[in-house]
Image: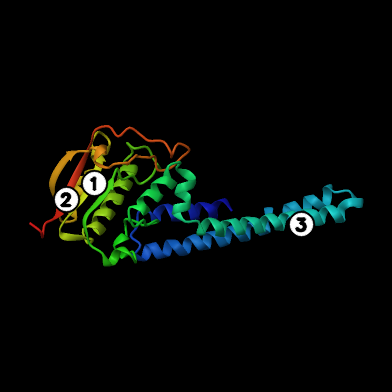
């Protein structure tokens, strides 16, 4: 079981660094499924039978039938409960998650809706240009404040930095297809070490974008904006922004 779960975890880990269009990505998906199947088989042949054996040994004869029935009922009830809640969690919308996690989310969403804003949830920067609502729209500006790929390693670790760079690169690759010919892409980002190693300007150049201006990030330019941690027990708390810049990019074809 341990080996099969190790195979599954390695497969999911490697998929973060491989293009979804590659053959290896599809192969890793099959390996993940095979690992789960092997784990279930191994569990059924090994530890899966242990509770039933132990139950038959420890229960007194006079209550074995009743207690065994109750234990079986409890086992299958909680199995059903896990299956039910899993589906509910999969169907849980990002809007509901925001309200649950962030204290001011409900009022912020209501205010935006009252102003006529369109709010979209679960938009992946790596394929946002294919989104059913966004793929038919162009924008004057697309803004991404303080991007972050989430914590897996320390901020100073190279593998964590590369994860952030892939996030920004994916955003730029999609955003450049979604702006008008004279449109702009704005990314606000910390400029101190190790955040400077993300090389935002270099990533934009790789996507055929040019830097038209770099200014100090001013939170006051975004009324009502409050930065929050993306995950963890303190996700509803803000973090020090420190020295940050707003990088403004435009398409080379416009110039």
Q: Is residue 238 left or right of residue 232?
A: left
Q: Secondary structure at mark 2?
A: strand
Q: Secondary structure at mark 3?
A: helix
| Of callouts 1 and 2, the N-terminal one | 1
* Extreme residue toward the left, this view: 255
Say if residue 10 shows up in the picture: no
- Residue corresponding to mark 1: 187
Q: Quadrant of the C terminus?
A: bottom left
Image height of 27 relative to 57, above or below: below
Which numbered mark, 2 or 3, is in the foreground of this view? Answer: 2
Which of 230 and 63 lies nearest the eye of the viewer? 230
Q: Residue at x 86, y 55 (%)?
A: 66
Q: Position of residue 5 (x, y in %)?
A: 53, 53
Q: For residue 222, what is the image quadrant?
A: top left
| Of callouts 2 and 3, the N-terminal one | 3
- Residue corresponding to mark 2: 249
């Amino acid at each position: 079981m341990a080996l099969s779960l190790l195979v599954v975890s390695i497969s999911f880990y490697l998929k973060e660094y491989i293009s979804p269009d590659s053959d290896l990505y599809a192969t890793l998906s099959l390996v993940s499924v095979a690992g789960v199947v092997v784990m279930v088989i191994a569990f059924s042949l090994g530890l899966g039978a242990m509770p039933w054996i132990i139950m038959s040994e420890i229960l007194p004869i006079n209550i074995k039938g009743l207690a065994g029935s109750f234990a079986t009922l409890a086992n299958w009830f909680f199995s059903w409960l896990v299956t039910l809640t899993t589906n509910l969690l999969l169907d849980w919308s990002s809007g509901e998650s925001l309200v649950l996690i962030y204290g001011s989310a409900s009022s912020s969403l209501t205010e935006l809706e009252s102003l006529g804003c369109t709010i979209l949830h679960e938009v992946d920067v790596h394929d946002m240009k294919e989104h059913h609502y966004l793929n038919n729209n162009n924008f004057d500006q697309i803004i991404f404040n303080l991007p972050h790929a989430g914590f897996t390693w320390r901020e100073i670790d190279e593998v964590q930095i590369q994860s952030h760079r892939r996030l920004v690169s994916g955003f730029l690759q999609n955003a450049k297809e979604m702006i008008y010919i004279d449109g702009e892409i704005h990314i606000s980002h910390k400029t101190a070490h190790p955040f400077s190693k993300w090389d935002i300007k270099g990533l934009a150049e790789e996507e055929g974008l040019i830097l038209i201006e770099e200014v100090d990030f001013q939170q006051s330019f975004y009324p009502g904006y409050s930065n929050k941690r993306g995950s963890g027990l303190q996700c509803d708390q803000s973090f020090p922004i420190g020295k940050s810049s707003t990088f403004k990019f435009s398409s080379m074809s416009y110039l």
